[in-house]
Amino acid sequence: MNNKPQDYDVILGGKAYPLTPLKELKIRDLDEVKILLGGGYIERKILALKEALKYGEDGFNLIIQALNDPSPKVSYIAYQLLSQTQENYGKKSLTKYYHWHNPKIQFLRTLEGHNGKINSLALNHDQGIAVSGSEDHTIKIWSLNTGDEYYTLRDHSEVVSTVDISENGKILVSGSYDQTLKVWDLEKGSLIGTITGHSDIISQVKIGSNGQTLISGSADQTVKIWNLQTGTLIHTLEGHNAPINNIKLITDDYTIITGGEDNQIKLWNGYTGKEINTIKTNYQDISCLDISADHQFLAISGKDKIIYILNLETQEEILTLSGHSHGINSLTFSPGGWSTLISGSTDKTIKFWNLQTGEEIRSLEGHSGAVLSVIISPDWQFILSGSEDQTIAVWKVIFQE
C-alpha cells in the first residue's frame, strides 16, 4: 500500500469538512473537493470525484490520484469517470494505469464440504456471505472472510442447479432438478416456502432488483415470472424451442435476457411478459452469457471454446476471444468501468480478457476439475469459482503492490 501523502491530503485553515448528511452535502469549490478526497469516508470521496470533473485539468489530476485510493470502490469509480470522459486528457491518463486491466490476483482459500460438483454461486459482499448450490442436493452458506461454513440447507430432493440472493441480502432462492423453486430466509437458514410450476429441470433463477419478483428458466423451454411475496405466477414467457440455460436482468427498465439451447437470445419486457426482440445466432451449444455493466455488450459462449462479444443494440459481433482448450461454462463482466471479461472452462482454468484489445491477460489454475461457475464481488475484491472437483476457490484481487 502507498502510504505517501497525496496532493489532496490537506485540511484548509486547520478545519475538517463539516459532517453534513450525504443528501445535504454541497461541494462549493475545488478546495472542498480536495478535503473530501483526503478524508476516509468512501461515499464522500465518490461525490467529490464526480464534482472534480467540473474543474478541468486540476480536477482530472485529483481523479487520477484517486486511482491509487485504498478503497477499491473509490478507485474503480475514478477509473470509470476517466474512461467515460470525452476529454482526451482524461483518456490519455489511463495509459499510465494499464495495470488496472491486469491486477494482481492471489489465491486466498478453498471452501470444502460439498460431496458433488458446484453448479452455482451467489454472493452478498456487504454481509460477507457466499452461497453454493451443488450436485449433492444441498446448499451451503459460507463466511467469505473466514471460509467457515455457517450452515447447510437440505430440502431439495435432487441436484441444486442455481441460487440467487436478493439485493438486501435477506432472501435466498434456489432451483433444482426436482423442478421446484425454494425460497429461504438467508439470515436464519430456514425455508420460507416451495414454488412449483415448471415441468422440467430449473436451470436459472434471478431475484428482481426490487425484491418483489422472481424469474426462473427451465429445460421445459419457458421462463416464468413470480410474485416473490406470495409465490403466485405472474407471467410465463414462451418462445424458445429448447431448454433455457441463462437469464440476465437489466434492472433499469426490467428487461430480461434469456439464452437457450436453440441458439437464440431473447429480450423480454419483464412488466408485460412480452418479447421485445430475438437475436438469432449461428453459435452452437450456447451454455453461458453475460451483459456488461453499461448494458452495451453481450458475451456469449459454449462448447465451441470461443467467446463472442456482441453489441447489444446493433446485434453485431464485434470481437471473438479464443484461448480455452475446452468448452466454456461461465462468463462474467467486471463491475464498474473496466472492460474486462472473466471466463471459466472445462479446461480447469479461469481466464481474464481485455476487451479493448481482445487479448488474454491472465489465466488462473487452481481447480482439478472443470470450472462451472465464476462470480466477482461488486467492489472487485473477491472472485469465487466453483468446480466439478467439489470445491470453491476464493481469490483476492489486489490493486496495489
Image: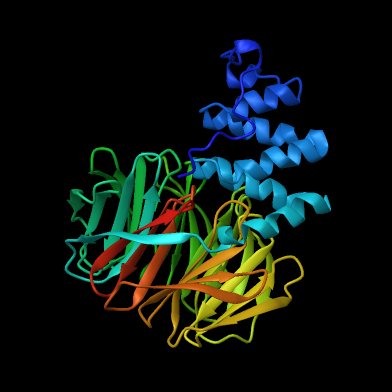
Q: Is residue 310 above or below residue 23?
A: below
Furthest residue toward front: 4
Q: In which quarter of the image is residue 88?
A: bottom right
Left or right: 106, with 252 as reference point:
left
Residue at 44% over, 54% down: 398
Left or right: 334, with 157 as reference point:
right
Image quarter (top left, top right, bottom left or bottom right) of the N terminus: top left
**Position of residue 341 measured from the top left corner of the image (x, y, whole percent):** 55, 67
**Position of residue 395 measured from the top left corner of the image (x, y, whole percent):** 36, 59
Q: Quadrant of residue 191?
A: top left
Residue at 64% over, 64% down: 267
Q: In which quarter of the image is residue 53?
A: top right
**Position of residue 288 measured from the top left corner of the image (x, y, whole percent):** 49, 73
Query: Is residue 273 shown to the viewer in this render?
Result: no
**Position of residue 136 measured from the top left corner of the image (x, y, whole percent):** 20, 67
Between 318 and 5, which is closer to the camera in this rendering? 5
Query: Is residue 216 shown to the viewer in this render?
Result: yes
Residue at 69% over, 55% down: 94
